[in-house]
Image (cartoon, rainbow, N blue to C red):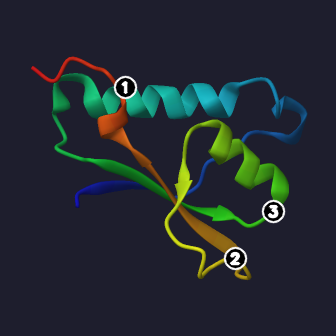
Amino acid sequence: MPAVKIGRLATETSSQGDGIGSNILGFIKISLTTKNKTGCRFIVVDAYNNEKTIQFYIKNKFKFMSAKDEKYDTRLMYFDLSSLNTDSN
């Protein structure tokens, strides 16, 4: 399935919790689905495997690809763009 991978997404420590990261993800989601110009179905990310990072992606509706990476430094997570109700014309 076609996907876009987020390489690095971070905000300065003093700005964390202000919604900047979620706003960036929202912009990416809308950009990829508006008139479906990209043909992508998923956004994927290798999220650092720590509570704060994982909870950030869960809050933004990302899901785990597998449980096999639970002990690794990063977890593969995805967001299904088809779950958004946007204009696909």
Of the image marks 3 and 1, the number of the one nearer the N terminus: 1
Examine the rendered structure and indicate whether residue 49 appears above or below residue 84. Answer: below
Q: Which one is in front, 53 or 84?
A: 84
> Which residue lies under the disc numbered 1?
30
Find residue 10 and report its horizontal and vertical position in percent.
69, 46
**Horizontal and vertical percent position of residue 55:** 74, 47
Secondary structure beneath disc 3? Answer: loop
Residue nearer the viewer, 1 or 20: 1
Q: Which mark is residue 50?
A: 3
The percent coordinates of residue 37 (x first, y second) are: 16, 33
Residue neighbourhood size for the residue with mark 3, other residues' Cα within 10 Å, grouped as few (<14), some (14–19), many (≥20)? few
In this view, the residue in front, 15 or 22, is: 22
| Circle 3/circle 1 CB separation < 8 Å | no
- Residue farthest along the left direction in this orientation: 89
* Mark linked to residue 48: none
The residue drawn where x is 9% and y is 20% is 89
Which disc, if any, is residue 70?
2
Q: CA distance from mark 3 to mark 2?
A: 10 Å
